[in-house]
């Protein structure tokens, strides 16, 4: 039986960072990850595409698989992988409901590892009360089997205890709050005790439809500092931005940009080398259901000498 654990949490909560840490700590165990955004997972590892074009072998023996063909195809590719894997981690969208996806653990050949929700210790209390955002964040927390507080290095011990107390007393969250080490060493998740009714699926669809995303593509190199300034100047409805672009200060480098609604950070991810001519991509996510692209997003694309795509 392959244990399937779902990792969720609101936009910018640290899900991909956690997945990369899990991959770094496999200690010879063959682990698989299923992601929506393959490009940022284990970005520094050597990746080798498999014959089926859907899974990618990582240098440490683990497997990455994307959701382009749907969840059923992804888990079937992993179930039949050789050599076999022992655990699967699924990263859901930042506005998705992980407890719904966790039901795939009941699929033949798998066991349910439950849903783990990442919560940013610096902003979770604010996010629960944010316009457009709060309902989604609260729903994720209440559907979790376990909660991992992230970015704890940015708060002191007292602040951390206050957040934990707030979750258990004021929000009356039933999920177990665990530390990072328990996740990294592969602690068994308890099976979800939350009801798996049709209404849960409906709630998930509603939460996902409350956000709209746009992808900006640019062939020009970009200054990371200037890009952060531009992103921070976007309207309040923009709750997330994430992308990989070529650094104008050193065209042989590419950098990752992360914006979580309050902070914007950039990091070098890989030497561009022969890939320096590849276009850069920046995904911008806003709260609400937008039929047209906001003028602010279009203006950002133009400033970057790029364009907005689907």
Image: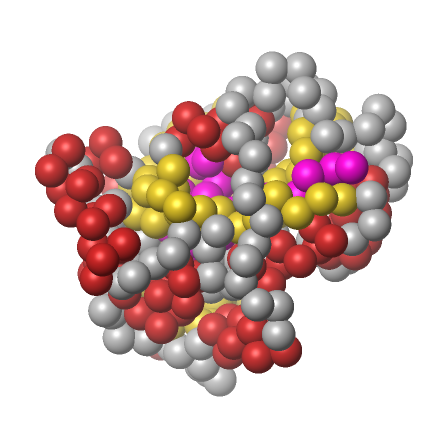
Give the answer, above or below, for where 251 lies relative to 308: above
Task: Kindly indicate the quadrant of the structure image that contains residue 265.
Answer: top left
- In the rendered image, residue 16 lying in the magenta stretch gets the answer yes
Q: Position of residue 150 (x, y in %)?
A: 33, 40
Q: Is residue 227 left or right of residue 270?
A: left
At x 42% / y 39%, what residue is drawn?
Answer: 256
At x 23% / y 31%, what residue is drawn?
Answer: 153
Quadrant location of the N terminus in the rendered image: top right
Q: Position of residue 178 (x, y in %)?
A: 38, 38
Q: Is residue 310 left or right of residue 2?
A: left
Q: Is residue 188 left or right of residue 68?
A: left
Task: Kindly indicate the quadrant of the structure image that contains residue 274.
Answer: top right
**Which of these two is toward me, 124 or 211?**
124
Q: How many numbered dots are placed on residues in this image? A: 0
Q: Is residue 167 left or right of residue 60?
A: left
Range of residues picked out in magenta = 1-18
At x 20% / y 50%, what residue is drawn?
Answer: 165
At x 40% / y 46%, what residue is drawn?
Answer: 176
Q: In this orientation, does residue 230 appear? A: no
**Which of these two is toward me, 168 or 116?**
168
Give the answer, above or below, for where 235 lies relative to 9: below
- In the rendered image, residue 214 lying in the magenta stretch gets the answer no
Q: Position of residue 123 (x, y in %)?
A: 23, 53
Q: Position of residue 59 (x, y in %)?
A: 68, 19
């Amino acid at each position: 039986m392959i244990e399937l654990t779902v990792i969720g949490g609101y936009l910018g909560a640290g899900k991909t960072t956690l997945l990369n840490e899990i991959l770094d700590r496999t200690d010879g165990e063959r682990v698989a990850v299923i992601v929506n955004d393959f490009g940022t997972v284990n970005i520094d590892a050597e990746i080798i595409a498999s014959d089926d074009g859907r899974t990618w072998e990582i240098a440490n023996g683990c497997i990455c698989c994307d959701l382009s063909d749907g969840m059923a195809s992804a888990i079937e590719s992993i179930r039949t992988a050789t050599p076999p894997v022992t655990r699967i981690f699924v990263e859901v969208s930042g506005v998705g409901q992980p407890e719904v996806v966790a039901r795939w653990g009941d699929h033949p050949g798998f066991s349910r590892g439950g849903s783990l929700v990442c919560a940013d210790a610096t902003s979770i209390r604010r996010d629960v009360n944010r316009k457009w955002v709060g309902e989604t964040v609260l729903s994720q927390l209440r559907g979790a089997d376990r909660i991992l507080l992230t970015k704890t290095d940015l708060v002191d011990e007292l602040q951390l205890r206050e957040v934990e107390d707030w979750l258990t007393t004021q929000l009356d969250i039933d999920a177990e709050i665990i530390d990072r080490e328990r996740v990294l060493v592969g602690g068994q998740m308890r099976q979800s005790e939350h009801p798996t009714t049709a209404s849960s699926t409906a709630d998930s669809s509603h939460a996902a439809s409350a956000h709209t995303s746009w992808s900006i593509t640019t062939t020009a190199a970009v200054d990371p500092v200037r890009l952060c300034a531009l992103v921070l100047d976007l309207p309040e409805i923009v709750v997330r931005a994430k992308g990989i672009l070529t650094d104008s200060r050193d065209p042989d480098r590419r950098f990752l940009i992360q914006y979580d609604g309050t902070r914007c950070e950039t990091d070098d991810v890989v030497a561009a080398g022969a890939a320096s001519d590849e276009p850069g991509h920046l995904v911008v996510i806003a709260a609400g259901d937008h039929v047209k692209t906001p003028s602010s997003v279009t203006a950002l694309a133009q400033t970057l000498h790029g364009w907005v795509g689907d």
